[in-house]
């Protein structure tokens, strides 16, 4: 294992990055992990107009912290990336990025070396005998809202660029955990896409992306009721197709997903606050405290009060 000081490259700042008249900048740093070729590169950039093209991409996660970007992978359809959403791009996958906002777009990209991807994937696939696959896995590249663990890590990495030495703000442990979380998320997308039942990979990716739009609306509603017509329109699917696909992929109907989300929010409030049951019921969209208690007991076998006492 090399010395810690030898594991970090010098911070690189590139002024006059993508955009008309060079109105942009990029800052990058790379941390070598171990004595081999393993490395993670972090890029923080600001672009105003313009775009870029990478004919041979690296496995990476791209996050738009502010503004919006339009990306196109493998010469396919364009996808808008905004609102703290992310996309995971495959190794050796060509892509283009455009930055249409006149006010500027702030991006954070984290690139993982091929050997790190292989190692993380083999661990996840259960290859604990020391064998590492030679072929790199491929995942459906869809726009999605990252889970709390990935979102927190990306926010921390972006904030690190405000310090004099951003390379010292992320430990090797943190970076490897992020790599593991990104690969797990990408693998989850692959599994969900397979459950759509479509034969062509392009069709599986398209259907999963449409389901993700519907799922985000349900998440934003925080357990509240969302009309099936609204979800179907957002997903560009018929109501029947949406119902069948959603249950096929997520194991429940959209209304069942909303009920689970409402209950999860209520449980989080029971743990993190001293709010009485009536206020939690109201905050989570239940018709009454008794309706909340019935739903809670069906799920846990306990009343909200008993569950709170047992878990605190």
Image (cartoon, helix red, strand yellow):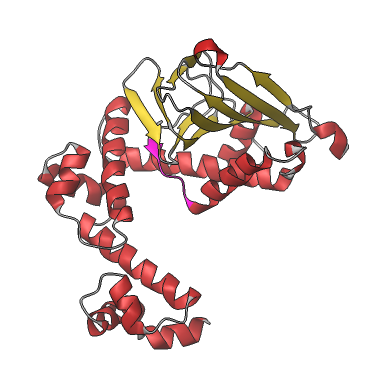
Residue 285 screen position, x and y as percent: 26, 70
- Side (left or right) of 68 relative to 288: right
For this rendering, which residue is in front, 71 or 129? 71
- Side (left or right) of 225 relative to 7: left
Residue 245 screen position, x and y as percent: 21, 45
In reply to whether residue 263 is colored magenta, the answer given is: no
Residue 139 screen position, x and y as percent: 44, 32
* Range of residues picked out in magenta: 143-147
Q: Is residue 291 above or below residue 226?
A: below
Query: What's the magenta bit mostly, secondary-structure-wise?
Result: loop
Location of the N terminus (image quadrant): top right
Query: Based on the displayed image, in which of its 4 quarters is residue 266 positioned?
Result: bottom left
Residue 263 screen position, x and y as percent: 33, 70
Q: Is residue 288 above or below residue 200?
A: below
What residue appears at the point 75 percent right and 28 percent down from the top-left corner? 11
Judge whether residue 127 can be spotted in this image. Answer: no
Q: Is residue 131 above or below residue 216?
A: above
The number of callouts visible is 0
For this rendering, which residue is in front, 257 or 266? 266
Judge whether residue 288 can be spotted in this image. Answer: yes
For this rendering, which residue is in front, 115 or 281? 281
What residue appears at the point 43 percent right and 83 percent down from the top-left corner? 307
What residue appears at the point 38 percent right and 67 percent down from the top-left corner? 265
What residue appears at the point 49 percent right and 12 percent down from the top-left corner? 20
């Amino acid at each position: 294992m090399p010395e810690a000081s030898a594991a970090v490259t010098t911070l690189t700042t590139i002024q006059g990055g993508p955009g008309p008249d060079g109105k942009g900048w990029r800052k990058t740093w790379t941390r070598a992990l171990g004595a081999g070729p393993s490395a993670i590169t972090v890029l923080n950039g600001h672009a105003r107009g313009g775009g870029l093209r990478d004919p041979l991409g690296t496995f990476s996660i791209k996050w738009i912290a502010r503004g919006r970007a339009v990306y196109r992978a493998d010469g396919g359809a364009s996808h808008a990336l905004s609102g703290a959403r992310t996309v995971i791009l495959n190794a050796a996958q060509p892509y283009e990025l455009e930055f249409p906002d006149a006010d500027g777009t702030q991006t954070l990209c984290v690139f993982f070396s091929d050997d790190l991807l292989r190692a993380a994937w083999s661990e996840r696939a259960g290859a604990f005998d020391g064998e590492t696959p030679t072929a790199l896995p491929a995942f459906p590249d869809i726009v999605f809202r990252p889970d709390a663990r990935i979102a927190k890590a990306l926010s921390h990495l972006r904030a690190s660029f405000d310090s004099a030495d951003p390379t010292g703000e992320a430990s090797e442990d943190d970076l490897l955990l992020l790599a593991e979380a990104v690969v797990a998320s990408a693998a989850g997308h692959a599994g969900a896409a397979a459950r759509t039942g479509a034969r062509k990979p392009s069709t599986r990716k398209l259907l999963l992306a449409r389901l993700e739009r519907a799922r985000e609306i349900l998440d934003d509603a925080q357990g509240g009721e969302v009309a099936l017509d609204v979800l179907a329109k957002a997903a560009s699917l018929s109501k029947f197709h949406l119902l069948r696909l959603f249950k096929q992929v997520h194991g429940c109907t959209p209304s069942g997903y909303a009920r689970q989300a409402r209950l999860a929010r209520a449980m989080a409030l029971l743990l993190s606050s001293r709010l009485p049951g009536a206020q939690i019921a109201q905050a989570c969209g239940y018709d009454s405290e008794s309706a909340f208690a019935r739903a809670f007991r069906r799920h846990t076998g306990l009343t909200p009060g008993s569950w709170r006492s047992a878990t605190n």
